Amino acid sequence: MNKEMIDSLLKTITDMSDEVKDIQTSGYRLDEHVTDIEMRINDIGLGLSGLQRDIRNIDRDVTTVIDKLLEKNSQTNQS
């Protein structure tokens, strides 16, 4: 191998090393994005659980109101 070939090989290795570093950096950023998305999904899940609880409470309250109205209507009709 002559000097030019060695220099060319060294440049190629250096360029490839830079590309590997860029890929690693992109991988780290991708991991950060995935972690952020996972946290958002968990937050949405918690929000949906809260909404389900609220809907159950509303349903229970509406049922109570309807039962009271039916009871009052039944008492009015019996009088």
Image (spheres, rainbow, N blue to C red):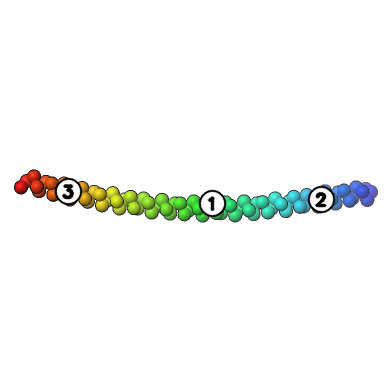
Q: Secondary structure at mark 3?
A: helix
- Mark 3 near mark 2, Cβ–Cβ under 8 Å? no
Q: Residue shown at 60%/54% (left/top)? A: 32
For marks 3 and 2, give the one nearer the viewer. Answer: 3
Disc 3 target residue: 69
Could you give the CA–CA distance between mark 3 and mark 2, rounded to whole angstroms? 83 Å
Which residue lies at the image location 92% right of the left edge and 48% below the top edge? 4
Q: Nearer the viewer, mark 2 or mark 1?
A: 1
Residue drawn at (94%, 48%) of the image: 2
> Would residue 31 be found to the left or right of residue 49 on screen?
right
Q: Amino acid at mark 1?
A: Ile
**What crowding class fits label 3: few (fewer than 14 Cα within 10 Å), some (14-19), or many (20 or more)?**
few
Left or right, residue 73 beside residue 33: left
Percent across and percent down for residue 31 are 61, 53
Residue to which mark 1 is pinned = 37
Q: Name which residue type carries label 2.
A: Ile
Q: How many marks?
A: 3
Measured from the top left, where is residue 43 in percent x and y? Answer: 47, 54
Asked whether 24 or 67 is in front, the reply is: 67
Query: SS at mark 2?
Result: helix
Question: How dense is the environment of label 2, judged by Cα within 10 Å: few (below 14), some, or many (20 and up)?
Answer: few
Residue designated by label 2: 13
Q: CA distance from mark 2 to mark 1?
A: 36 Å
Q: Residue furthest left?
A: 79
